[in-house]
Structures are given as structure tokens and as C-alpha cells.
Amino acid sequence: MSEYLKSTESAPPLPAPSANQPYVVVSALQAGIIHIPVDLAIQGEARSHRKCPSLSFYLKHSASDKHLIFDLGLRKDWASYPPMVQKHYGELMPCEVPQSVEESCIKGGLDPALIKNVVISHLHFDHIGDHTPFKNATFTIGGEGKSHLTDGYPGNPEAHFLAESTPPDRTKFLSMSDFATSVGPFPYVHDFFGDGSVYIIHKPGHCAGHVNLLARTSADGAWIYLGGDIAHDTRLVTDPNTDIATAAADGSPYCMHRDPVQARIDIKRVRSLVRMPRVEFLIAHDWKWFEDNKDTAFLPGKIVPKA
């Protein structure tokens, strides 16, 4: 991973569209609410809880029936999570699920059984949702996350991960050899549909197997970057004077990222991306974007490409 330590000050531009360039139409999906302690997201903040969405997204290919869902958010049945998740997060990050991803799809006129591809950014409890309604989908996750499944609950009663977070017989694990190209500031990229419309980005700082999506949203050069949990507050990307938290407000050590050094590098690369023209940037828990767009951007609505 030595390439990750190289400077990202002068990032290459994003690839120009080809003739008849395919792209995707993106809609947000309601996937629950999580109350995130601000001091665990940004270093130096006082303890308070921010009511945040746990966003999922539906991407529909412009030139075919190809489509995918990115992340499945929270489960409605809290009791179905591993006991360690219930114990650790029940009070630290209270959750509610007024509408699941499955219900969001149905409300938006989309039958979950018709979805053929689901990409999970990582296997934390607020991103895996309930895979069972997506009975005909192939699930794609970062290969480093496989260990969380093989050592997951209930086989390991102390695990924070469910062994069947994704359907075992329909899960594809991306190895490093699958991240065979580079795009813009990102050295490890997988061209999901093989036509430059959707790229899966290797972003290992937050969690084993953590991936993001970079997708074209128009034929003439608009993009969207779906950042998962690369950051838990957009200020970490938009304000270089902020830093990820490595201690809680009371001084006790706590970091939401398994590798803080790598997480900072991942964030720095996205900072160089968002300075580029016509790039929309969203993280899974972007509360302000949710408040500003909840009436228009959710299925059957769509996220308008950046002009």
C-alpha cells in the first residue's frame, strides 16, 4: 500500500466521457436514523448527539437494465444484531428505523427482488441492513471484510459482525487484483460495469474491506462520490483544519477508524476530488444534505447531477 503514502496535492483529473458515455441516475433511499456522538467524529468537539441518516442509494444505468444498490442501512429488528453490537451501540449511538431500504424501494416503485447487484461499503451494523428481500442480487464487498464473516456471530459470541451479513452463496469478495486501475486521486479502483460508469474505490482506513463508489451522473462530465464512512462529518472533507477524533470528549481513547493514519490519507484524497468541477460528495451520515434534499432526492425522486 505504499502508493497511499504519496502526496495527493496534485491529483490527476477524472477521465473524460467517451462517445455515448453510459452513466447512472442516482436516488437516495431511507435506511434509518443514527444518533452519532459529535466528539467521536471530530477531535476536540464536546459531547452531543447529532441525529443523522444512514443513507443508502439506488443507481440505475442509463443504457441498460443494469442497476445496483449501495449499502442497506440499519435493520428494523434491533434484537437480530449481535449481543456485542446491542450492548456497545444501544446507548452510545441510539438508532431508529422508520423506513427500511426494502420499504424505501417498494414505496419508490421498485421491487427488491428485481435488484441484481448490491454493494456494501463495509460490514458495520448500520450498513448491512437485511439482505433477505434482495433474493436475486449478487453482493459485492471488499475482500478484507471476509474475515469479519468467517469469525462472525453467532459462531463467535463476542463478535461485532454477523456471519450472514450478506448471503454466503451470493457474495463476491473483491481482492486487491480486482482494483486494477486508477482514477483521479485514487490508485486502487474497480470498474464495476466495465464501461467507466461506476467505480468501486478501495478505502481501507475506516474498516477492513471498506469501499466507496465514484459514479458518473451524466454523459457530459458530472460525478457523484458516495463515501460510506470515510468520514462521519462532512467537515472532515471540506475543512482541512478538522481532524478525525482519536479521543472522546472525556479524554478516553476512541477512534471510529481502525487505522487513523490511513483514514487521514483516504480523506485527503477525497479532499482533492471535491475540488474538481461537477463532483457531488455524500457520506452515509450527511445530516445537512438529508434535511436539504429529503423531499426531492429519494426514490422515486433523484439526485440532480451537479452543473
Image: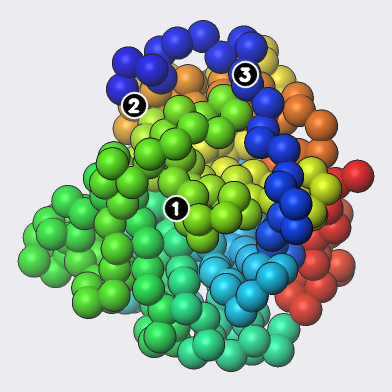
Q: Measuring 31% from the left and 22% from the top, which residue is drawn there?
A: 1
User: Neighbour class for label 1 at 10 Å: few (<14), some, many (≥20)?
Assistant: many
User: At label 1, which amino acid type do we have?
Assistant: Ser
**Dot 2 and dot 3 residues touching (CB under 8 Å):** no
Identify which residue, 292 or 223, lies in the foreground: 223
User: At label 3, which amino acid type do we have?
Assistant: Ala
Q: Tell me residue 117's x, y (percent).
A: 46, 72
Q: Tell me residue 20's x, y (percent).
A: 75, 58
Side (left or right) of 124 relative to 82: right
Q: Measuring 29% from the left and 68% from the top, which residue is drawn there?
A: 171
| Residue 302 in which image quadrant | bottom right
250 in relation to 31, above or below: above
> Where does label 3 land, which residue?
11
Residue 259 tag number: 2
Q: Tell me residue 229's x, y (percent).
A: 51, 43
Q: Measuring 37% from the left and 73% from the top, which residue is drawn there?
A: 138
The CA span between labels 2 and 1 is 16 Å
Select label 2 or label 3 by which is in front.
3
Identify which residue, 297 or 118, lies in the foreground: 118
Residue 57 visible = yes
Question: Disc 2 or 3, which lies upstream in sequence?
Answer: 3
| Residue 295 in which image quadrant | bottom right
Question: Disc 1 or 3, which lies upstream in sequence?
Answer: 3
Q: Tell me residue 92's x, y (percent).
A: 44, 48
User: At label 2, which amino acid type do we have?
Assistant: Asp
The CA span between labels 1 and 3 is 24 Å
User: Neighbour class for label 3 at 10 Å: few (<14), some, many (≥20)?
Assistant: some
Select label 2 or label 1 by which is in front.
1
Identify which residue, 263 or 221, lies in the foreground: 221
